[in-house]
Image (cartoon, rainbow, N blue to C red):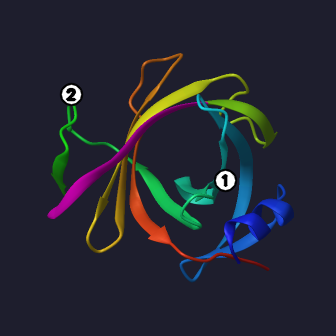
Amino acid sequence: MNVEEFRKKIKIDLRIVVDNQIFKIEQLVKFRYDDGSFYIKCYLQNGFVLADDLNDNIFVFVKEIQSDIQLPFSENLEFDGKKFEFLFEAHAVAEEIWGKELFKKSEGEKFWDYKSEDESYLSLGIHDETGKRQDFYGKIIKDVEFL
């Protein structure tokens, strides 16, 4: 399904199929970008995260990682043997949450996102309140399904 359909149907405790794997949604967070637009981030079991991107009608399927990439981040990075190109930098704040309180309402995150030729995705982030790094690695997914 596309991102618009996904946003209409998504709710806590649903089971979804992502990359041929079944996940239960533990938390949904609506993040508001500084420019006023928003995205939905689903915290799934086993540390996986699914976020939507309405502009490109895609989903980003990632898992939190530890990286040694330091600020300032460059336009091109190498990670996991792959070359990544910078996509964008953004800041967003959790506006609404449902489910477990993994990310709290009003907390924010700043992130720098990168993509490789094989659709791998790298998001380097910093949690506003704690200053802790929150880096994620995975891939771009074109479709998700509900069970």
Residue 95 image offset from top left, x and y in percent:
74, 31
Residue 44 image offset from top left, x and y in percent:
64, 57
The amino acid type found where label 1 is placed reads: Cys
Residue 22 part of the magenta segment: no
Secondary structure of residue under mark 1: strand
> Of label 1 and label 2, which has the lower sequence position?
1
Q: Is residue 139 visible?
A: yes
What is the span of residues highlighted in magenta in the rendered image? 81-92
User: Residue beneath label 2, please?
Assistant: 72
Residue 45 image offset from top left, x and y in percent:
63, 58
Residue 114 image offset from top left, x and y in percent:
32, 52
User: Residue beneath label 1, please?
Assistant: 42
The mark total stands at 2
Q: Is residue 80 visible?
A: no
Q: Residues within 10 Å of mark 1 (few under 14, many from 20)?
A: many
Q: Quadrant of the C terminus?
A: bottom right
The amino acid type found where label 2 is placed reads: Pro
Secondary structure of residue under mark 2: loop
Q: Quadrant of the N terminus?
A: bottom right
Residue 87 part of the magenta segment: yes
Relative to 38, does residue 119 appear above or below in the rendering? below
